[in-house]
Image (spheres, helix red, strand yellow):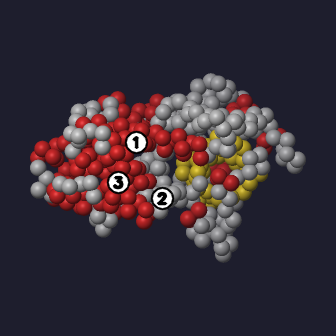
């Protein structure tokens, strides 16, 4: 690995969204994940997730030298150089042939951290608007405690992402997502006379409050906390709300029970991590508004990463489990599955992730190409095999974890 050195000023940054397809690039990223799986033939290769404020890509080196495997860890900022390609099916990839860790001062942290596109002032105003619908004083008092940014959970609620991936996976994402769910729920409630609007808003705003303990609030080290892995966001959310209820004795036992039911049931199904299914009007509304708005946001997030005019997402959208149709904007320009032919670039540098599978002597269509031991889920709770032809597809263990712990909703 090239030694880190101090240049005196931040290096030039090219955002993931602006990387030129088919060209060699050199810029820096946050190393969000580092893996060294092996093929069935026993060859070790490098696979890293590189992220910045505009998105992320998969970095690959099928024959990594020692310099590409050591000297940096997950959470470090690294400068990477190599051939960039947007694969037709599998998205942005960088064939990495040079990598070095950067020190503070050599990069601009703001270029690495994705932030909600909605201004915080606008979010605060929209939050105040939905809170105005809470007419029951005890619930207003509980929400004031919950959303107070000078204490927990409010301090973390205001900044933590709403998900690890798929939707609102950026700073202030939980606040944005929760406000959207509350706004949507209130619109639905206009059609039904027997909905308790105060309870509805409280449940909508707090349905994901457990993520203040389940997700890291460190913008440079996003991911799940020990509580998120070992307990899950619903259990954590119930614990938080029970603490808030204890601080707000004016909340009646009946109201406390109904509020907790919304949190416990908001994933909608036991198979998706909820211990109970929605059994009240308010719980049903919160569940469907949560699932609907998060799913639409996931489609929007997938579309944002694609060329203008794309009709389909190239991969399944995580929350839907299938690819999403984006409209009749005309077929996107087809990506080249073959090697690039740019003058000055060697053929060895030109293959993308799936061309590289063949180059490595593996079968891209064979889910057993990579050993299952090298695809243990993010929690370390057990092995699961990712299909070798889809670096973004979660393993069985990861899929179960996503549903069980947070369902990205």
Distance in Å between CA atoms under marks 1 and 2: 19 Å
Residue 292, percent from left and from top:
42, 38
Badge 1: few (under 14), some or many (20 or more) residues near its Cα, within 10 Å? Answer: many
Asked if labels 1 and 3 touch by Cβ distance under 8 angstroms, the answer is no
Q: Nearer the viewer, residue 356 or 266?
A: 266
Q: Quadrant of the N terminus?
A: bottom right
Q: Nearer the viewer, residue 390 or 126?
A: 126
Q: Earlier in the sequence, mark 1 or mark 2?
A: 2
Query: Is the residue 37 above or below the residue 94 in the image?
Result: above
Q: Earlier in the sequence, mark 3 or mark 1?
A: 3
Q: Residue at x 64, y 24 (%)?
A: 365
Residue 45, percent from left and from top:
65, 40
Q: Nearer the viewer, residue 181 or 25?
A: 181
Q: Residue at x 65, y 46 (%)?
A: 59
Distance in Å between CA atoms under marks 2 and 3: 20 Å
Helix, strand or loop at label 3? It is: helix
Report if residue 79 is visible in the image: no
Q: Residue at x 43, y 58 (%)?
A: 172
Dividing the picture into quarters, in which one does residue 348 lie? top right
Query: Is the residue 11 above or below the residue 8 in the image?
Result: above
What residue did someone put label 1 on? 409
What residue did someone put label 2 on? 118
Q: Earlier in the sequence, mark 2 or mark 3?
A: 2
Res 212 label: 3
Asked if labels 2 and 1 touch by Cβ distance under 8 angstroms, the answer is no
């Amino acid at each position: 690995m090239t030694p880190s050195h101090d240049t005196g000023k931040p290096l030039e940054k090219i955002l993931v969204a602006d990387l030129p397809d088919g060209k060699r690039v050199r810029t820096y990223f946050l190393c969000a994940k580092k893996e060294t799986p092996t093929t069935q033939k026993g060859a070790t290769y490098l696979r890293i997730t590189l992220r910045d404020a505009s998105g992320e890509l998969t970095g690959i080196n099928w024959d990594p030298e020692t310099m590409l495997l050591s000297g940096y860890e997950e959470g470090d900022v690294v400068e990477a150089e190599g051939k960039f390609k947007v694969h037709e099916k599998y998205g942005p990839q960088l064939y990495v042939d040079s990598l070095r860790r950067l020190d503070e001062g050599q990069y601009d942290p703001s270029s690495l951290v994705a932030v909600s596109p909605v201004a915080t002032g606008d979010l605060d105003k929209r939050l105040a608007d939905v809170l105005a619908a809470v007419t029951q004083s005890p619930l207003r008092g509980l929400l004031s405690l919950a959303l107070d940014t000078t204490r927990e959970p409010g301090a973390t609620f205001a900044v933590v992402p709403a998900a690890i991936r798929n939707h609102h996976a950026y700073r202030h994402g939980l606040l944005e997502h929760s406000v959207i769910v509350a706004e949507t729920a209130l619109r639905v409630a206009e059609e039904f006379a027997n909905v308790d609007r105060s309870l509805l808003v409280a449940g909508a705003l707090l349905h994901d409050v457990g993520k203040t303990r389940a997700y890291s609030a460190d913008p440079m080290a996003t991911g799940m906390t020990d509580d998120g892995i070992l307990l899950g966001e619903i259990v954590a959310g119930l614990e938080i709300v029970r603490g808030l209820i204890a601080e707000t004795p004016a909340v009646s036992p009946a109201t406390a029970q109904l509020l907790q039911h919304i949190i416990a049931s908001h994933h909608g199904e036991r198979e998706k991590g909820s211990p109970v299914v929605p059994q009240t009007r308010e719980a049903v509304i919160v569940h469907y508004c949560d699932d609907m708005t998060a799913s639409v946001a996931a489609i929007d997030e997938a579309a944002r990463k694609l060329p203008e005019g794309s009709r389909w997402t190239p991969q399944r959208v995580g929350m839907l489990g299938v690819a999403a149709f984006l409209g009749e904007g005309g077929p996107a320009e087809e990506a080249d599955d073959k090697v690039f032919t740019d003058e000055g670039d060697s053929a060895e540098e030109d293959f993308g992730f799936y061309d590289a599978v063949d180059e490595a002597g593996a079968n891209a269509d064979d889910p057993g190409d990579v050993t299952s031991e090298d695809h243990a889920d993010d929690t370390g709770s057990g092995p699961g095999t990712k299909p070798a032809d889809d670096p973004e597809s979660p393993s069985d263990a990861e899929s179960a974890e996503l549903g069980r712990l947070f369902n990205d909703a």
